[in-house]
Image: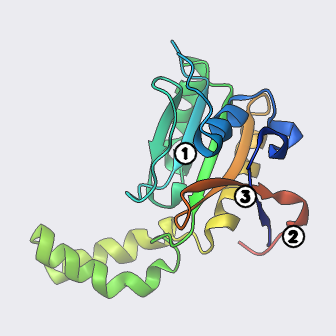
Amino acid sequence: MTGSLLPVRDRDHILPRYRNTPIADLLAYHNLASPHRSYDQAALLVGMCMDYRQRLRIPDRFAYIMRVGGARILRLEFQLSFAIAIGGVQAIALVGHDQCGMVNLGARRHAFVRGLITNAGWTRRKAETHFDSLAEQFEIGDAMVSVIRDAARLRQKYPAVAVAPLMYRLSDGLLYQVDETEVEEAPR
């Protein structure tokens, strides 16, 4: 599966399907430094990685933010449904990023186990069992592929909600749209 990143350097770069949605507002606030409006209620939910190196430039009360490793909100769908049903969310932005720690997670097994032993006081056996039983659920393989797949899944589940796969580049701190027209299905 492949996709390419589409920069947003002015409002005309925002893909037509996101214009006049909270996704366009997110891109304008974050990338274009558009003046912040006041919000009484969030219209957007942003699912993004828990990585501390990402910081969104958005107004207060503009969006619900769900942060979880690899931006995988799969296990948080009740909360997502609540934000849509009760909170009035009209759009979802799934934000992956480069240099994500959930990519190639298996290669971090030793460091993960050692860290739980040192920092959490766990036994080696407990730390290894913990990693081995859960790591596969959180491994994302490729960050862009992951947000594309999750966006497609959420579009099916919530057909009236706009869903955008986006990428955050750590080198410039900007959000990029993902061009899904080049996407080919790959084995999961």
Q: Is residue 90 left or right of residue 2?
A: left
Residue 128 visible, this angle: no
Task: Residue 84: give x, y in percent of width and height.
Answer: 61, 25
- Residue in view at x 61 percent, y 23 percent: 43
Callout 2 environment at 10 Å: few (<14), some (14 to 19), or many (20+)?
few
Image: 154 above or below 168:
above
Residue positioned most to the left: 121
Q: Are marks 2 and 3 in contact (CB under 8 Å)?
A: no
Identify residue for label 2. Answer: 184
Secondary structure found at label 3? helix
Q: Which residue is mark 1?
A: 47
| Quarter in which the N terminus is drawn | bottom right
- Marks 2 and 1, Cα distance to the nearest angstrom? 23 Å
Distance, label 3 to label 1, CA atoms, is 13 Å
Q: At which x and y percent is residue 49?
A: 48, 55
Please determine whether, in this image, residue 66 is positioned above or below residue 145.
Answer: above
Name the N-terminal-most of marks 2 and 3.
3
- Secondary structure under the numbered disc 2 in the rendered image: loop
Q: Which residue is mark 3?
A: 148
Which one is nearer the viewer's eye here, 121 or 63? 63
**Which residue is found at the position 79% from the left and 66% from the top?**
4
> Mark 3: which amino acid?
Ile
Residue 188 seen in render: yes
The image shows residue 128, relative to residue 87, as above or below, that is below
Q: How many marks?
A: 3
